[in-house]
Amino acid sequence: MLPGISEMMQLHGSAVLFDLDGVLVDSSAYIERQWREWAASRGLHAEAFLRYCHGRRAVETIRLAAPELDAEAEVARFRDVAVPDEERPARFPGAQELLTALPPDGWAVVTSGSRAVARRRLVDAGLPVPAVLVSAEDVRQGKPSPEGYLCAAGLLGRAPNESIVIEDAPAGVEAARAAGMRVIAVTTTHPALELHAATVLAPSLTAIHLGAADPQSGSRFTLELAAECATPRAPYVPPRLASR
């Protein structure tokens, strides 16, 4: 068990950058079915792709799991199929409350999926579509590259140290930390031990609440985390330093 926080933790910031799948919407069943069906159509075992797909663009998942394939050509052949009613993404508890409490210019979504899919999932889940939505088409390198999060912060007019990221996947956590941002990792899709690079671990969005601005730090708002949240046991060390 990771150590709990005896008192409510506060993170001061001026922008919140959300991952989409696994954070705001629960689309895991549909995503995994898509990968299983694609792998079967190519005569491949799906497990290798499922190991990497969460939090990464499809092109990078294929490059990692099957480097012998032409990843860009494979992604170009992906079909945008209808989502069965039983697999339509549902919003995670706490998502709507947190998004509607934040100022419209104070949050963004950074996803490894396409823009069209991201917008559809937000709408299907009954969530607002943000003015800033950074998708797979908007970056040259996907997560764990920091490009997407740095792009979103820039479009919101915020510095990295003013931005707080909410993620669920190790690749996304690494991307946010590489961008110089603090990260709340929700343990909705990955166990806590795989999210050790996060600043704080939270069981769900319901443990995160919006508080007032902090004049002392100059932040626009405060994210207050409930007592059941935890700090990772080991401090975060950037990969390039850890390898020395």
Image (spheres, rainbow, N blue to C red):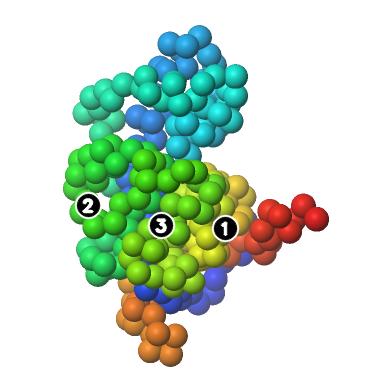
Which numbered circle lies on residue 151? 3
Q: Is residue 222 left or right of residue 53?
A: left
Where is mark 2, residue-wise?
129
Determine the residue located farthest toward the front in the rendered image.
140
Tell me which numbered mark, 1 or 3, is placed earlier along the sequence. Answer: 3
Quadrant, the C terminus = bottom right
Q: Is residue 24 left or right of residue 243?
A: left
The amino acid at mark 3 is: Cys
Q: Which residue is depicted at the point 57% across and 58% down?
A: 178
Mark 2 closeness class: few <14, some 14–19, many ≥20 residues within 10 Å: some
Mark 3 closeness class: few <14, some 14–19, many ≥20 residues within 10 Å: some
Q: Which residue is depicted at the point 38% across and 23% down?
A: 76
Specify the quadrant of the image occupied by residue 232.
bottom right
Q: Is residue 204 left or right of residue 96?
A: right
The amino acid at mark 1 is: Ala
- Image coordinates of residue 132 in percent, x first then y, are 29, 56
